[in-house]
Amino acid sequence: MQNAVNLNYLFRRCLNADYKKSGLDANYAVTRSGRRIYIFFEWSDGIGDWKNNLDFPARAHGGGDAFFVHRGFLRVWRSIRLIIENEVNAVISNNKINEIVCVGYSHGAALAGLCTEELVFSLGGKISVSGYGFGCPRFIFGRLPKEIKVRFSSFLPVRNVPDLVTYLPPRILGYFHPSPVLEIGERGKYSPIRAHFPESYLAETKNIVP
């Protein structure tokens, strides 16, 4: 597990973050703790979020090394991308920062993944970047180019089995997670819908010892 991180701590912080809305109804929070920056992304919160969740035809993202992403999530990420980068750069310019941690839940987990990839690319290894997506839907379409896959290698999708959201959109439509999924919980304990509830993730992440 990445740096033996405390998943319960990260998830609780994600649930309790002081979010602000920008772009296409994207709720995010950028905070600093010592030499670390946290970027949190909120779960689906309103009709606009659900419209984007269900808008899953793929769209190319990037330049010469383009890859394909769930169109709704990509649209939301692009609407806040520069805003977040500017906030992060402002914190970096005024503080000694050595790590950035991106965290999201559900809808926000996909945004955390895209943010992780973007910051790994833009910071060029100068600052350690990692990401955690709780109840993360699939948001990558088709195969990732090797250089892009490397950028997602520090992003960890977390599935409380058998969380339905983490299996959507289905593989038969060409969708995948960008990196291996960490499965937590016990099979048979939750229904596919209840497994996605925040209280279920809170309960199961308590059992993960850093």
Image (cartoon, rainbow, N blue to C red):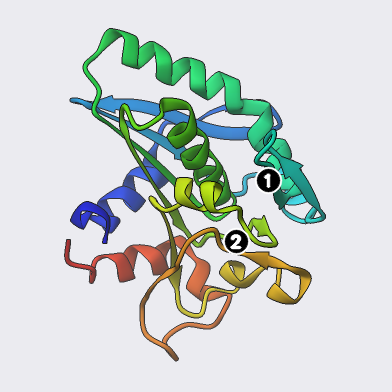
Residue 13 visible in the shown view: yes
Residue 42, percent from left and from top: 52, 43
Q: Which residue is mark 1?
A: 73
Viewer-closest of 14 and 154 = 154
Label 1, secondary structure: give it.
helix
**Residue 194 horizontal side relative to residue 205, left or right:** right
Residue type beneath disc 1: Phe
Q: Can you tell which mark lies on residue 22?
A: none
**C-alpha distance separating marks 1 and 2:** 10 Å
> How would you rate the neighbour count of disc 1 (Cα within 10 Å): few for under 14, some for 14-19, many for 20 or more?
many
Q: Is residue 8 above or below residue 161?
A: above
Image quarter where the N terminus lies is: bottom left
Earlier-in-chain disc, 1 versus 2: 1
Residue drawn 22% across the image and 55% down it: 6
Residue drawn 42% across the image and 20% down it: 88
Residue 94, percent from left and from top: 29, 8
> How would you rate the neighbour count of disc 2 (Cα within 10 Å): few for under 14, some for 14-19, many for 20 or more?
many
Name which quarter of the figure residue 209 lies in.
bottom left
**Residue 30 horizontal side relative to residue 80, left or right:** left
Q: Which residue is mark 2?
A: 137
Name which quarter of the figure residue 200 lies in.
bottom left
Residue type beneath disc 2: Pro
Residue drawn 73% across the image and 37% down it: 75
Residue 137, percent from left and from top: 60, 61
Whether residues under marks 1 and 2 lie with C-beta atoms below 8 angstroms apart, the answer is yes
Number of numbered discs: 2
Q: Is residue 86 above or below residue 6?
A: above
Residue 179, percent from left and from top: 48, 61
